[in-house]
Protein backbone atom coordinates (compact mmCIF):
# COMPACT_ATOMS: atom_id res chain seq x y z
CA UNK A 1 0.00 0.00 0.00
CA UNK A 2 2.68 2.49 0.97
CA UNK A 3 4.23 2.72 -2.49
CA UNK A 4 1.12 3.33 -4.59
CA UNK A 5 -0.49 5.57 -1.96
CA UNK A 6 2.80 7.38 -1.41
CA UNK A 7 3.04 8.24 -5.09
CA UNK A 8 -0.62 9.33 -5.25
CA UNK A 9 -0.23 11.45 -2.11
CA UNK A 10 2.97 13.07 -3.36
CA UNK A 11 1.11 13.96 -6.57
CA UNK A 12 -1.73 15.59 -4.61
CA UNK A 13 0.70 17.65 -2.52
CA UNK A 14 2.76 18.61 -5.56
CA UNK A 15 -0.40 19.56 -7.41
CA UNK A 16 -1.78 21.98 -4.82
CA UNK A 17 1.46 23.98 -4.56
CA UNK A 18 1.79 24.37 -8.36
CA UNK A 19 -1.85 24.78 -9.45
CA UNK A 20 -3.64 28.08 -10.12
CA UNK A 21 -4.72 29.12 -7.54
CA UNK A 22 -2.18 27.33 -5.36
CA UNK A 23 -1.46 26.84 -1.69
CA UNK A 24 1.86 28.25 -0.38
CA UNK A 25 2.91 25.03 1.29
CA UNK A 26 1.38 21.89 2.77
CA UNK A 27 2.31 19.09 5.16
CA UNK A 28 0.22 15.90 5.18
CA UNK A 29 0.58 12.61 7.04
CA UNK A 30 -1.24 9.31 7.54
CA UNK A 31 -0.71 6.96 10.47
CA UNK A 32 -1.75 3.46 11.37
CA UNK A 33 -1.99 2.36 15.01
CA UNK A 34 1.81 1.99 15.26
CA UNK A 35 3.51 4.63 13.15
CA UNK A 36 3.21 7.14 10.33
CA UNK A 37 2.90 5.36 7.00
CA UNK A 38 3.08 8.55 4.94
CA UNK A 39 4.78 11.90 5.59
CA UNK A 40 4.84 14.56 2.90
CA UNK A 41 5.67 18.24 2.54
CA UNK A 42 5.56 20.53 -0.49
CA UNK A 43 5.88 24.22 -1.30
CA UNK A 44 7.20 27.03 0.89
CA UNK A 45 6.64 28.12 4.48
CA UNK A 46 5.94 31.61 3.12
CA UNK A 47 5.49 32.67 -0.48
CA UNK A 48 7.88 35.61 -0.04
CA UNK A 49 10.74 33.60 1.49
CA UNK A 50 12.93 30.77 0.20
CA UNK A 51 12.46 28.33 3.15
CA UNK A 52 10.91 25.05 2.00
CA UNK A 53 7.95 23.59 3.82
CA UNK A 54 9.22 20.54 5.76
CA UNK A 55 7.57 17.82 7.83
CA UNK A 56 8.89 19.51 11.00
CA UNK A 57 7.43 22.95 10.14
CA UNK A 58 5.45 24.55 12.97
CA UNK A 59 1.78 25.40 12.36
CA UNK A 60 -0.86 27.40 14.18
CA UNK A 61 -3.26 24.46 14.48
CA UNK A 62 -6.34 26.52 15.41
CA UNK A 63 -9.46 24.43 16.15
CA UNK A 64 -7.66 21.11 15.90
CA UNK A 65 -6.68 22.20 19.45
CA UNK A 66 -10.25 21.41 20.55
CA UNK A 67 -9.84 17.63 20.64
CA UNK A 68 -6.80 17.98 22.92
CA UNK A 69 -8.85 20.09 25.35
CA UNK A 70 -11.67 17.56 25.12
CA UNK A 71 -9.19 14.83 26.07
CA UNK A 72 -8.16 16.79 29.19
CA UNK A 73 -11.86 17.08 30.13
CA UNK A 74 -12.34 13.32 29.72
CA UNK A 75 -9.37 12.64 32.00
CA UNK A 76 -11.06 14.64 34.77
CA UNK A 77 -14.33 12.78 34.17
CA UNK A 78 -12.45 9.47 34.58
CA UNK A 79 -11.03 10.66 37.90
CA UNK A 80 -14.44 11.68 39.23
CA UNK A 81 -13.38 15.34 39.43
CA UNK A 82 -15.78 16.58 36.74
CA UNK A 83 -19.44 15.75 36.18
CA UNK A 84 -20.34 16.37 32.52
CA UNK A 85 -23.97 17.00 33.45
CA UNK A 86 -23.47 19.31 36.44
CA UNK A 87 -23.74 23.08 35.86
CA UNK A 88 -20.44 24.22 34.37
CA UNK A 89 -20.55 27.29 36.64
CA UNK A 90 -19.75 24.95 39.53
CA UNK A 91 -16.21 24.81 38.11
CA UNK A 92 -15.97 28.07 36.12
CA UNK A 93 -18.32 30.55 37.84
CA UNK A 94 -18.07 33.18 35.07
CA UNK A 95 -19.99 30.97 32.64
CA UNK A 96 -23.00 31.40 34.91
CA UNK A 97 -23.01 35.11 34.08
CA UNK A 98 -23.73 34.61 30.37
CA UNK A 99 -27.20 35.65 29.24
CA UNK A 100 -29.24 34.89 26.11
CA UNK A 101 -29.33 37.68 23.51
CA UNK A 102 -32.71 38.18 21.81
CA UNK A 103 -31.62 40.84 19.35
CA UNK A 104 -31.00 44.58 19.62
CA UNK A 105 -33.40 47.31 20.68
CA UNK A 106 -34.18 50.49 18.74
CA UNK A 107 -31.12 52.17 20.24
CA UNK A 108 -28.89 49.30 19.12
CA UNK A 109 -28.45 47.90 22.63
CA UNK A 110 -28.38 44.11 23.14
CA UNK A 111 -31.60 42.68 24.60
CA UNK A 112 -30.56 40.09 27.17
CA UNK A 113 -32.40 37.62 29.40
CA UNK A 114 -31.46 34.82 31.76
CA UNK A 115 -31.11 31.38 30.14
CA UNK A 116 -33.79 28.76 30.86
CA UNK A 117 -31.22 26.23 32.08
CA UNK A 118 -27.59 26.00 33.12
CA UNK A 119 -24.81 25.24 30.67
CA UNK A 120 -23.19 21.85 31.38
CA UNK A 121 -19.74 20.67 30.34
CA UNK A 122 -21.42 18.08 28.09
CA UNK A 123 -23.10 20.94 26.21
CA UNK A 124 -19.73 22.64 25.84
CA UNK A 125 -18.16 19.40 24.56
CA UNK A 126 -20.93 19.04 21.96
CA UNK A 127 -21.27 22.72 20.91
CA UNK A 128 -24.84 23.01 22.20
CA UNK A 129 -24.31 25.68 24.90
CA UNK A 130 -25.45 28.61 22.72
CA UNK A 131 -22.00 30.05 21.96
CA UNK A 132 -20.63 31.04 18.55
CA UNK A 133 -17.84 33.07 16.86
CA UNK A 134 -17.93 36.55 15.35
CA UNK A 135 -16.70 35.28 11.98
CA UNK A 136 -19.65 32.86 11.55
CA UNK A 137 -22.48 34.66 13.35
CA UNK A 138 -24.06 38.03 12.51
CA UNK A 139 -25.09 38.82 16.12
CA UNK A 140 -21.57 38.23 17.44
CA UNK A 141 -20.10 40.20 14.56
CA UNK A 142 -22.39 43.14 15.38
CA UNK A 143 -21.33 42.96 19.05
CA UNK A 144 -17.70 43.07 17.93
CA UNK A 145 -18.19 45.97 15.52
CA UNK A 146 -20.60 48.13 17.57
CA UNK A 147 -19.91 47.11 21.18
CA UNK A 148 -16.20 46.31 21.10
CA UNK A 149 -16.62 42.62 21.97
CA UNK A 150 -12.98 41.36 21.77
CA UNK A 151 -12.08 38.67 19.23
CA UNK A 152 -11.04 35.22 20.45
CA UNK A 153 -7.60 35.81 18.91
CA UNK A 154 -6.92 38.29 21.73
CA UNK A 155 -6.77 35.25 24.08
CA UNK A 156 -8.33 37.39 26.82
CA UNK A 157 -10.84 36.57 29.55
CA UNK A 158 -13.06 39.31 28.11
CA UNK A 159 -13.31 37.55 24.74
CA UNK A 160 -15.12 34.63 26.41
CA UNK A 161 -17.84 36.78 28.01
CA UNK A 162 -20.22 36.64 25.06
CA UNK A 163 -23.99 36.23 25.22
CA UNK A 164 -25.72 32.98 24.30
CA UNK A 165 -27.61 32.82 21.01
CA UNK A 166 -30.20 30.40 22.40
CA UNK A 167 -31.06 28.51 25.55
CA UNK A 168 -28.38 25.94 26.42
CA UNK A 169 -28.95 22.49 24.95
CA UNK A 170 -31.35 23.52 22.19
CA UNK A 171 -29.21 22.94 19.12
CA UNK A 172 -25.70 22.57 17.71
CA UNK A 173 -23.85 25.82 16.97
CA UNK A 174 -20.09 26.04 16.64
CA UNK A 175 -18.24 28.41 18.94
CA UNK A 176 -16.10 29.10 21.99
CA UNK A 177 -17.33 26.03 23.88
CA UNK A 178 -13.93 24.34 24.17
CA UNK A 179 -12.30 27.57 25.36
CA UNK A 180 -14.71 27.35 28.30
CA UNK A 181 -13.80 23.67 28.72
CA UNK A 182 -10.19 24.86 29.07
CA UNK A 183 -11.28 27.22 31.84
CA UNK A 184 -13.00 24.32 33.61
CA UNK A 185 -9.89 22.13 33.33
CA UNK A 186 -7.72 24.95 34.72
CA UNK A 187 -10.10 25.54 37.62
CA UNK A 188 -10.13 21.87 38.63
CA UNK A 189 -6.40 21.29 38.03
CA UNK A 190 -5.33 24.58 39.61
CA UNK A 191 -2.78 25.31 36.90
CA UNK A 192 -2.60 26.67 33.33
CA UNK A 193 -4.03 24.54 30.54
CA UNK A 194 -0.65 24.30 28.79
CA UNK A 195 0.89 22.74 31.92
CA UNK A 196 -1.98 20.26 32.16
CA UNK A 197 -1.46 19.30 28.52
CA UNK A 198 2.31 18.89 28.98
CA UNK A 199 2.17 16.56 31.95
CA UNK A 200 -1.04 14.67 31.30
CA UNK A 201 -1.21 14.41 27.48
CA UNK A 202 1.98 15.47 25.72
CA UNK A 203 4.54 13.61 27.87
CA UNK A 204 2.71 10.25 27.66
CA UNK A 205 2.41 10.72 23.90
CA UNK A 206 6.01 11.81 23.28
CA UNK A 207 4.83 15.20 21.97
CA UNK A 208 7.63 17.77 22.07
CA UNK A 209 6.52 20.71 19.92
CA UNK A 210 3.01 21.67 21.06
CA UNK A 211 2.53 24.86 23.03
CA UNK A 212 0.25 27.85 23.58
CA UNK A 213 3.36 30.05 23.86
CA UNK A 214 5.42 30.28 20.70
CA UNK A 215 9.20 30.35 21.28
CA UNK A 216 11.89 31.88 19.07
CA UNK A 217 13.19 28.38 18.27
CA UNK A 218 9.74 27.40 17.01
CA UNK A 219 9.34 30.70 15.16
CA UNK A 220 12.36 29.80 13.02
CA UNK A 221 10.34 26.87 11.61
CA UNK A 222 6.96 28.60 11.55
CA UNK A 223 4.78 28.29 8.46
CA UNK A 224 3.37 31.75 7.69
CA UNK A 225 -0.36 32.41 7.47
CA UNK A 226 -1.53 33.77 4.12
CA UNK A 227 -4.60 35.71 3.01
CA UNK A 228 -6.29 34.44 -0.14
CA UNK A 229 -7.33 37.33 -2.37
CA UNK A 230 -10.50 37.34 -4.47
CA UNK A 231 -8.26 36.84 -7.52
CA UNK A 232 -6.69 33.73 -5.95
CA UNK A 233 -3.47 35.50 -4.97
CA UNK A 234 -1.69 34.84 -1.64
CA UNK A 235 -0.42 37.54 0.72
CA UNK A 236 1.66 36.70 3.84
CA UNK A 237 -0.10 38.12 6.90
CA UNK A 238 2.53 38.18 9.69
CA UNK A 239 -0.25 36.95 11.95
CA UNK A 240 0.55 35.33 15.29
CA UNK A 241 -1.54 34.51 18.33
CA UNK A 242 -0.33 36.29 21.52
CA UNK A 243 2.99 34.79 22.66
CA UNK A 244 2.04 35.32 26.32
CA UNK A 245 -1.73 34.86 26.24
CA UNK A 246 -3.87 35.89 29.22
CA UNK A 247 -5.89 32.71 28.62
CA UNK A 248 -4.67 29.43 27.14
CA UNK A 249 -7.45 29.13 24.57
CA UNK A 250 -8.55 25.49 24.57
CA UNK A 251 -10.53 26.07 21.41
CA UNK A 252 -7.77 27.22 19.08
CA UNK A 253 -4.52 28.30 20.75
CA UNK A 254 -1.94 25.58 20.10
CA UNK A 255 1.10 25.66 17.83
CA UNK A 256 2.89 22.45 16.84
CA UNK A 257 4.04 20.05 14.14
CA UNK A 258 1.85 17.70 12.15
CA UNK A 259 4.04 14.82 13.35
CA UNK A 260 3.16 15.60 16.95
CA UNK A 261 -0.55 15.75 16.12
CA UNK A 262 -0.21 12.28 14.60
CA UNK A 263 0.89 11.01 18.04
CA UNK A 264 -2.37 12.39 19.42
CA UNK A 265 -4.36 10.71 16.62
CA UNK A 266 -2.57 7.40 17.35
CA UNK A 267 -3.65 7.61 20.98
CA UNK A 268 -7.29 7.76 19.82
CA UNK A 269 -6.67 4.84 17.45
CA UNK A 270 -5.13 2.85 20.31
CA UNK A 271 -7.98 3.15 22.84
CA UNK A 272 -6.22 5.87 24.82
CA UNK A 273 -2.73 4.37 24.98
CA UNK A 274 0.26 6.56 24.11
CA UNK A 275 3.90 5.81 23.32
CA UNK A 276 5.02 6.44 26.91
CA UNK A 277 1.87 5.84 28.91
CA UNK A 278 -1.90 5.78 28.96
CA UNK A 279 -3.80 9.04 28.40
CA UNK A 280 -7.40 7.74 28.56
CA UNK A 281 -9.00 4.45 29.56
CA UNK A 282 -10.25 2.31 26.67
CA UNK A 283 -13.84 2.52 27.95
CA UNK A 284 -13.60 6.34 28.01
CA UNK A 285 -12.54 6.40 24.35
CA UNK A 286 -15.39 4.05 23.40
CA UNK A 287 -17.85 6.27 25.29
CA UNK A 288 -16.47 9.49 23.82
CA UNK A 289 -16.51 8.38 20.16
CA UNK A 290 -20.27 7.79 20.21
CA UNK A 291 -22.83 10.38 19.13
CA UNK A 292 -23.59 12.70 22.08
CA UNK A 293 -25.93 15.04 20.17
CA UNK A 294 -28.94 12.73 20.25
CA UNK A 295 -31.12 13.47 17.23
CA UNK A 296 -29.67 16.97 16.76
CA UNK A 297 -27.32 17.39 13.81
CA UNK A 298 -24.26 19.39 12.84
CA UNK A 299 -25.24 22.25 10.53
CA UNK A 300 -23.20 24.02 7.81
CA UNK A 301 -20.95 26.90 8.84
CA UNK A 302 -21.82 30.29 7.33
CA UNK A 303 -19.01 32.77 6.87
CA UNK A 304 -19.80 36.29 8.13
CA UNK A 305 -16.32 37.85 7.93
CA UNK A 306 -15.17 37.00 4.39
CA UNK A 307 -11.47 37.44 5.22
CA UNK A 308 -11.72 34.71 7.87
CA UNK A 309 -14.34 32.19 6.78
CA UNK A 310 -16.17 31.02 3.69
CA UNK A 311 -19.42 29.08 3.88
CA UNK A 312 -18.22 25.57 4.68
CA UNK A 313 -19.51 22.05 5.22
CA UNK A 314 -18.01 18.59 5.30
CA UNK A 315 -19.79 16.08 3.02
CA UNK A 316 -22.80 18.24 2.05
CA UNK A 317 -26.11 16.38 2.06
CA UNK A 318 -24.84 13.81 4.56
CA UNK A 319 -25.83 13.62 8.22
CA UNK A 320 -23.17 14.60 10.76
CA UNK A 321 -23.26 14.11 14.55
CA UNK A 322 -20.89 15.12 17.37
CA UNK A 323 -18.76 13.07 19.73
CA UNK A 324 -16.67 14.24 22.75
CA UNK A 325 -15.29 16.21 21.01
CA UNK A 326 -15.19 15.48 17.27
CA UNK A 327 -17.53 15.54 14.29
CA UNK A 328 -18.89 12.12 13.30
CA UNK A 329 -19.87 11.37 9.71
CA UNK A 330 -23.02 9.24 10.08
CA UNK A 331 -22.70 7.73 6.60
CA UNK A 332 -19.71 6.57 4.58
CA UNK A 333 -18.12 9.74 3.23
CA UNK A 334 -17.44 10.30 -0.49
CA UNK A 335 -13.72 9.94 0.30
CA UNK A 336 -14.23 6.39 1.59
CA UNK A 337 -14.03 7.36 5.26
CA UNK A 338 -16.35 4.88 7.00
CA UNK A 339 -19.52 5.84 8.86
CA UNK A 340 -18.81 6.58 12.50
CA UNK A 341 -15.32 7.99 11.95
CA UNK A 342 -14.13 11.12 13.75
CA UNK A 343 -12.67 14.35 12.39
CA UNK A 344 -12.58 18.11 12.35
CA UNK A 345 -10.61 21.12 11.13
CA UNK A 346 -8.77 24.34 11.97
CA UNK A 347 -9.43 27.86 10.70
CA UNK A 348 -6.31 28.20 8.51
CA UNK A 349 -7.41 25.16 6.47
CA UNK A 350 -6.11 22.28 8.56
CA UNK A 351 -8.11 19.03 8.42
CA UNK A 352 -7.87 15.62 10.09
CA UNK A 353 -9.71 12.34 10.37
CA UNK A 354 -9.54 9.42 12.83
CA UNK A 355 -10.84 6.07 11.52
CA UNK A 356 -10.87 3.81 14.58
CA UNK A 357 -12.63 1.01 12.67
CA UNK A 358 -9.77 0.49 10.21
CA UNK A 359 -7.01 1.86 12.46
CA UNK A 360 -5.88 4.85 10.38
CA UNK A 361 -5.85 8.61 10.72
CA UNK A 362 -4.59 11.53 8.68
CA UNK A 363 -3.84 15.24 8.91
CA UNK A 364 -3.55 17.93 6.23
CA UNK A 365 -2.04 21.27 7.20
CA UNK A 366 -1.97 24.56 5.32
CA UNK A 367 -1.92 28.16 6.62
CA UNK A 368 -4.44 30.09 4.56
CA UNK A 369 -7.38 32.32 5.43
CA UNK A 370 -10.32 32.30 4.92
CA UNK A 371 -11.44 28.86 6.13
CA UNK A 372 -12.93 26.61 3.47
CA UNK A 373 -10.25 27.55 0.94
CA UNK A 374 -11.26 25.58 -2.18
CA UNK A 375 -7.70 24.71 -3.26
CA UNK A 376 -6.63 23.42 0.14
CA UNK A 377 -9.93 21.71 0.97
CA UNK A 378 -10.22 19.91 -2.38
CA UNK A 379 -6.56 18.90 -2.04
CA UNK A 380 -7.34 17.44 1.37
CA UNK A 381 -10.36 15.55 0.02
CA UNK A 382 -8.22 14.16 -2.81
CA UNK A 383 -5.54 13.13 -0.32
CA UNK A 384 -8.01 11.25 1.88
CA UNK A 385 -9.71 9.71 -1.17
CA UNK A 386 -6.36 8.45 -2.50
CA UNK A 387 -5.71 6.81 0.87
CA UNK A 388 -9.02 4.94 0.93
CA UNK A 389 -8.64 3.88 -2.73
CA UNK A 390 -5.30 2.29 -1.89
CA UNK A 391 -6.72 0.71 1.28
CA UNK A 392 -9.58 -0.86 -0.71
CA UNK A 393 -7.12 -2.15 -3.32
CA UNK A 394 -4.98 -3.70 -0.61
CA UNK A 395 -7.97 -5.33 1.07
CA UNK A 396 -9.24 -6.62 -2.28
CA UNK A 397 -5.83 -7.78 -3.48
Image (spheres, grey):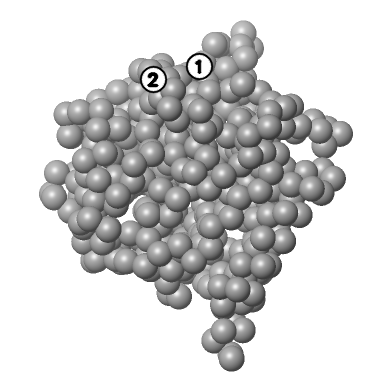
Instruction: Name the residue beneath numbered marker 1.
Output: 150
35 on left or right of 104: left
Local SS, label 2: loop
How far is the residue under mark 2 from the one under mark 1?
A: 14 Å
Of badges 2 and 1, nearer the viewer stands 2
At horizontal 53% and vertical 23% (from top left) the residue drawn is 240
Q: Is residue 293 left or right of residue 144?
A: left
Pinpoint residue 61: horizontal percent, then vertical percent: 50, 39
Instruction: Describe the element under mark 1 as helix, strand or loop.
Output: loop
Residue sitting farthest toward the bottom? 397
| Residue 99 on image: x %, y % | 41, 25
Neighbours of disc 1 within 10 Å: few (<14), some (14-19), many (20+) = some
Q: Quadrant of residue 395?
A: bottom right
Spot occupied by residue 59 in the image (x, y as percentages of width and height): 52, 37
Question: Front-most of 15 and 84?
Answer: 15
Label 2 CA crowd tier, 10 Å (few <14, some 14–19, many 20+): some
Q: Is residue 261 above or below residue 218?
A: below
Q: Position of residue 371 (x, y in %)?
A: 65, 39
In primary-sequence order, the first of circles 2 and 1 is 1
Residue of label 2: 245
Residue at the outermost left position: 80
In the rendered image, the quadrant that contains the C terminus is bottom right
Residue at the spot x=67%, y=60% of the render? Answer: 10
Amino acid sequence: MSTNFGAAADAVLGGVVTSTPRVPGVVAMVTNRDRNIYEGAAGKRRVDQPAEMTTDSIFAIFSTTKAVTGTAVLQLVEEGKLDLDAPAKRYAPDIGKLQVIEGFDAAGEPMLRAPKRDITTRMLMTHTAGLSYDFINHTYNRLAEEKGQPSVITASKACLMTPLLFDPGERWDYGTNLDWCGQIVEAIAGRPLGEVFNTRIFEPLGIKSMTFELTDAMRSKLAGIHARGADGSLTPMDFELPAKPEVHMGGHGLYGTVGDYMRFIRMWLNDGAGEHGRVLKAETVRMAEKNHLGDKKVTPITGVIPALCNDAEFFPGQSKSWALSFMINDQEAPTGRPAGALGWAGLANLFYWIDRQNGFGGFWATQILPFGDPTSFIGYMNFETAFYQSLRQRMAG
